[in-house]
Structures are given as structure tokens and as C-alpha cells.
Image: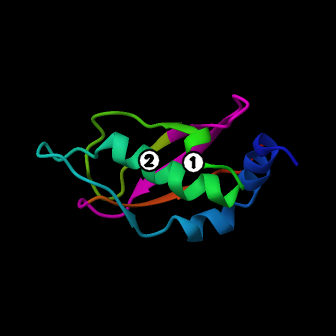
């Protein structure tokens, strides 16, 4: 299976991802917004190896200036080595940088 198909196949394994990324934490800036670059790195570092890919071979894009508020939900986007895009739903679990991330089922 090529790397992109592994990431897409991984996207179907929602329960495994929800457990794997639960309880992670990222940096919070002085203005109480999440550090999007830190979150993008954390997501790539967690998701890529589960798909059998090097984190350096994927990119993740998350919204900037996201307030660090417990319960906030937003979507990031992982780009596989072949250019395929995979959504990643992020929920902040506290206002200190804790988060859960889930790759929703692909249609």
C-alpha cells in the first residue's frame, strides 16, 4: 500500500486516532491563542507514523489566532505525500493547550 493510501486508510480508523491523540498539549501564546505551528507539528508527528509515513513527508495546516478556550472546535488539514487532503477535527480540552484530535470517516 502506498503512503497516501495508508493515510487515507488510517482516516477510517477513527477510534484508534481518537485514543492516540487524546490528552496532547500545545503551547499557548501571551494573547491566549494556540500556537498553530506547534499544533501542526504535533499532529504531523502523531498521525504520520501511524500511517507508516515520515512526519517530514506530510504537512498540516491549522487556523491561526484560534483562542485557547476549552470546548473550542476547529478543523485542520493534513496533506499526504501525494497531495491528498485529510481533515482533522480538533477540540480543545482546556484553556492551557490540551486537545483531542480525530480524523473523521472518509466518504
Q: Nearer the viewer, residue 16 or 57?
A: 57
Q: Position of residue 21 (x, y in %)?
A: 52, 64
Residue 52, located in which quarter of the rendered image? bottom right
- The residue under label 1 is 55
Determine whether, in the image, residue 84 is placed left or right of residue 87: right
Q: Looking at the picture, how far across and down is residue 83, in whole percent? A: 69, 28
Q: Position of residue 32 (x, y in %)?
A: 17, 47
Rounded to the nearest whole Å, what is the CA distance between mark 2 and mark 1?
8 Å
Look at the image and say whether residue 77 sits in the magenta stretch.
yes
Q: What secondary structure is found at the residue carrying circle 1?
A: helix
Point out the residue furthest to the right here.
Answer: 1
The span picked out in magenta is 76-96
Residue beneath the point at 62% across and 49% down: 54
Residue that appears at 60% across and 55% down: 47
7 or 71: nearer the viewer: 7
Q: Residues within 10 Å of mark 1 (few under 14, many from 20)?
A: many
Residue 104 visible: yes
Callouts 2 and 1 close, C-beta under 8 Å: yes
Q: Which residue is mark 2?
A: 41
The answer to whether residue 42 is above or below residue 25 is above
Q: Residue furthest top?
A: 83
Image: 61 above or below 93: above
Q: Residue at x 29, y 44 (%)?
A: 35
2 and 23: which is toward the camera:
2
Element marked by disc 2 = helix
Amino acid at each position: 500500500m502506498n503512503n497516501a493510501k495508508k493515510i487515507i486508510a488510517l482516516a477510517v480508523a477513527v477510534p484508534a486516532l481518537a485514543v492516540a491523540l487524546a490528552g496532547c498539549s500545545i503551547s499557548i501564546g501571551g494573547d491566549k491563542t494556540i500556537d498553530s505551528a506547534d499544533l501542526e507539528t504535533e499532529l504531523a508527528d502523531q498521525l504520520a507514523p501511524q500511517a507508516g509515513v515520515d512526519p517530514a513527508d506530510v504537512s498540516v495546516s491549522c487556523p491561526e489566532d484560534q483562542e485557547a478556550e476549552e470546548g473550542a472546535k476547529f478543523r485542520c488539514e493534513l496533506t499526504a505525500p501525494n497531495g491528498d487532503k485529510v481533515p482533522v477535527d480538533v477540540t480543545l480540552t482546556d484553556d492551557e493547550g490540551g486537545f483531542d484530535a480525530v480524523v473523521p470517516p472518509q466518504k
